[in-house]
Image (cartoon, rainbow, N blue to C red):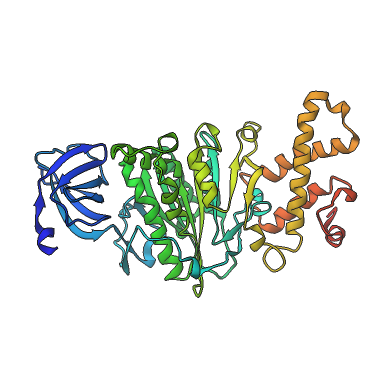
Amino acid sequence: MNSLMQKEFQTIQSISGPILVAEGLQEASFGEIVHIKLADGTKRLGQVLEVTEKFAVIQVLESTQGLDIATTKIRLTGEVAKLAVSSEMIGRTFNGRGELIDNGPELTIQKRLEVMGSPLNPVMRDQPADFIQTGISAIDGLNTLVRGQKLPIFSGSGLPANELVAKIIRQAKVKSGEDFVIVFGAMGLSFREAEMFRKDFEESGAFEKVVFFLNMADDPSVERILTPRCALTAAEYLAFDLDKQVLVILSDMTNYCETLREVAAAREEVPGRRGYPGYMYTDLASLYERAGRVKGKLGSITQLDILTMPDDDITHPIVDLTGYITEGQIVLSRELFRNGINPPINVLPSLSRLMNLGIGEGKTRADHRGVADQLYAFYARGVELKKLSSIIGEEGLSETDKLYLDFANKFEHEYLNQMDENRDIEDTLAVGWKLLSMLPKTELKRVKPALIEQYYGK
């Protein structure tokens, strides 16, 4: 292989989008990184996607502008894509391929890890446990994020998903005394969005706990294939080698899936639903399943994956497949946003399937489950009565129904609406009890009587 690595192949047959096809590379391996040399001497990186007896299909990880079939040369490297990792990564900014771009000092490299990685071995998985506080009541109180969980946020175009992400990065924390790090993999950000995050991190001091992987909208789209994998590789090193509690935020996974569709179209693959490749479920699972806890390891990886729903369609393939793989969802509502609620989290379709593993006595508080269930029940009743009152008018409602209607309005404006407020779990539960106390004690059927006596009206 060494002699092949020195040899340059000038055998490109075709270029289509980010894909080029070359002859004579039978010794190439799947996933291998290749150097692509242009006539003017500049080099770009590519990755082998497929090798047959005659042809090799190569994905260009940078722009294909200027590539000429006749003069461009290819050289095998014998290595797959790797990320240089170090304890000094925290507080630094990397591009989507894992290269430093913040003009700071070079890292003292401890390891070079393959970025493709693999899902955690189910046999070695430990059960998710403990609570990650985000400071957002709709999440902490009703859809609790648990260490080792993967919980997506379903947004819509124009909704403040980026502002919500920035707020979570500023405020998220675990138990005192534990090392907590956030790895943020941003894909397809505009210049304005990137500057918003940089400014927010610098002003809030959040950069001290963030490893930032940044793929801009004008960067080669195919680079987005590597961005989440670089972020997760860094997270695995920090969690399982350095024993840190790591929260990975990947935004926007819709941009990632659009790149998958672009590559599949360039390869002329048979499309699946809405033109996305049939293997998209497997591909997404290879990313999402890298979250979790490992037996015998102190660290953990928790994922928050942000998706923009095209046309606000929660049945869209990207959203649908993500829902199958992950353990719940946080749904942002356009209607709430129009009504001035921020963050506009619609708690009724939202769900954290692992919530019970992170709450209760010794973790949050003994009344947490009961308060959450009762708030859900009251709000669901209030929303139904809103629809009914729009038909028959409030005059047709009973006095108790009017209390539920008032509860729903105050729940949205006092519990959900808190973009400029950071609440710890005690504050969240206190606001919850304040709202529950709007209804008579006899209506509280989902909270234990002893807890009602302890907290009602306080």
- Placement of the N terminus among the 4 image quadrants: bottom left
- Placement of the C terminus among the 4 image quadrants: bottom right
Left or right for 413, reference 165: right
Quick check: 49 above or below 341? below
Q: Nearer the viewer, residue 431 or 54?
A: 54
Q: In percent of the image, x 38 and y 61: which residue is there?
A: 89
Q: Residue 143 location, x and y as percent?
A: 64, 52
Q: Residue 51 location, x and y as percent?
A: 22, 51
Q: Nearer the viewer, residue 268 or 336?
A: 268
Q: Residue 100 location, x and y as percent?
A: 31, 55
Residue furthest to the front:
53
Left or right for 24, reference 260: left
Q: In percent of the image, x 71 and y 58: which residue is there?
A: 426
Q: Nearer the viewer, residue 266 or 228?
A: 266
Left or right for 327, reference 206: right
Q: Nearer the viewer, residue 387 or 32?
A: 32
Q: Residue 41 location, x and y as percent?
A: 11, 46
Quick check: 86 above or below 349? below
Q: In percent of the image, x 16 and y 45: which residue is there?
A: 22
Asked if residue 358 shows in the view, the reply is no
Asked if residue 72 shows in the view, the reply is yes
Q: How many marks?
A: 0
Left or right for 160, reference 277: right
